[in-house]
Image: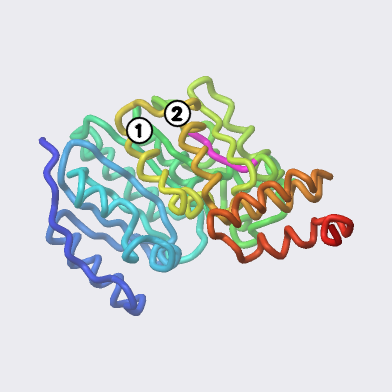
């Protein structure tokens, strides 16, 4: 199978949820398949080339945050000719659903994943990154990109994480349960997290396999996927992973783009102030003001400027 681009001409913006889902259903049926997986999930597949991108996303988040309100993989089908399997949840479920398990069981039985030369599982926060790691077991040799994953929400293993009250009600002790064990068959696993987010860092530390590469993202916070999108590095990250060229060094090179991201720089200025480095914070404010980012940075610089400097 050769990579072939599919012309995707959809307008998913400003649609009601039912119309959005219905449009995806019709398009996927024309170019692959679409399945409802119980009441809480669905799966859409677009068949194009021998590279497969498997994404896990919350449907509402995809509608609100993704380019053109599309599942993340659509752009790669359109531009690169990759095949795309999109798993969507209708609420924060961590994809802990027997209908989802049965779906992947059936794909394995049918030899679905055997048709692809390169496979990448991708997920970002909200249980999606957990699912990308946990379900990667169905495709040995795949690469996993997990942005801010939870290892588990089982109370006996992660009782120290008091977040995600709804998620902690799910059963993490049956099939596809403990994500750090499910990645044993993967070729490479990349776990991105913000070290300052203590609970996220604890989860990341549970992925201790030799083929796991930790990708610390200092001060990028909870929404790493949106931060990567703002910086223009998300697409590059995924393509490097597909080509087998992603490593910690290449990632850190990409991460240098954060110096141009006002959201990151605001967090950096606040951090410098809190840790007792107001002089450095002022220098950064001056730099951002010169680049035309005046909101926040002018006010913060005035706040950090000593009174004698103002009188001079």
In the rendered image, the vertical position of residue 74 relative to residue 299, given as above or below: above
Residue furthest front as drawn? 312
Q: Is disc 2 in contact with disc 1, using a CB cutoff of under 8 Å?
A: yes
Main SS type for the magenta part?
Answer: strand
Residue in the foreground of this view, choosing between 233 and 189: 233
Q: Dot 1 surroundings within 10 Å: few (below 14), some, or many (20 or more)?
A: some
Residue drawn where x is 45% and y is 28% of the image = 250
Among the two numbered marks 2 and 1 on one chain, the one whose residue lies closer to the N terminus: 1
Q: Which mark is residue 153?
A: none
Residue 38 percent location from the top left of the image: 37, 63
Please tell me which residue is depicted at 31% across the width and 73% down the height of the picture: 13
Instruction: Specify start and end residues of the magenta stretch as a single range.
Output: 190-194
Which residue corresponds to mark 1? 240
Label disc, if present, on residue 250 of the rendered structure: 2
- Image side of residue 290 versus residue 234, left or right: right
Magenta span contains residue 236: no
Above-or-below relation of 58 to 232:
below
Question: Tag count in the figure?
Answer: 2
């Amino acid at each position: 199978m050769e990579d072939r681009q599919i012309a995707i001409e959809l307008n998913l913006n400003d649609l009601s949820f039912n119309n959005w889902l219905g449009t995806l259903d019709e398009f996927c049926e024309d170019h692959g398949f679409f399945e409802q997986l119980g009441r809480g999930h669905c799966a859409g597949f677009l068949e194009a080339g021998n590279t497969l991108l498997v994404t896990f996303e919350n449907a509402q988040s995809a509608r609100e945050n993704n380019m053109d309100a599309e599942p993340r993989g659509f752009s790669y089908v359109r531009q690169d000719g990759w095949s795309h399997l999109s798993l969507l949840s209708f609420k924060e479920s961590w994809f802990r659903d027997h209908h989802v398990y049965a779906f992947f069981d059936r794909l394995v039985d049918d030899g679905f994943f055997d048709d692809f030369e390169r496979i990448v599982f991708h997920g970002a926060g909200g249980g999606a990154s957990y699912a990308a790691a946990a379900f990667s077991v169905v495709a040995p040799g795949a690469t996993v990109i997990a942005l801010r994953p939870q290892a588990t929400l089982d109370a006996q293993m992660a009782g120290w994480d008091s977040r995600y009250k709804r998620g902690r009600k799910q059963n993490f002790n049956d099939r596809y349960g403990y994500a750090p064990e499910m990645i044993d068959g993967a070729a490479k696993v990349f776990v991105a997290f913000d070290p300052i987010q203590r609970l996220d860092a604890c989860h990341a530390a549970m992925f201790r396999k030799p083929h796991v590469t930790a990708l610390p993202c200092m001060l990028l916070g909870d929404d790493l996927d949106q931060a990567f999108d703002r910086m223009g590095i998300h697409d590059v990250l995924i393509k490097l992973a597909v080509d087998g060229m992603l490593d910690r060094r290449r990632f850190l090179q990409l991460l240098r783009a954060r110096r141009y991201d006002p959201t990151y720089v605001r967090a950096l200025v606040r951090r410098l102030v809190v840790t007792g480095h107001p002089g450095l914070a002022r220098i950064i404010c001056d730099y951002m003001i010169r680049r035309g980012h005046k909101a926040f940075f002018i006010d913060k610089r005035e706040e950090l400027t000593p009174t004698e400097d103002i009188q001079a």
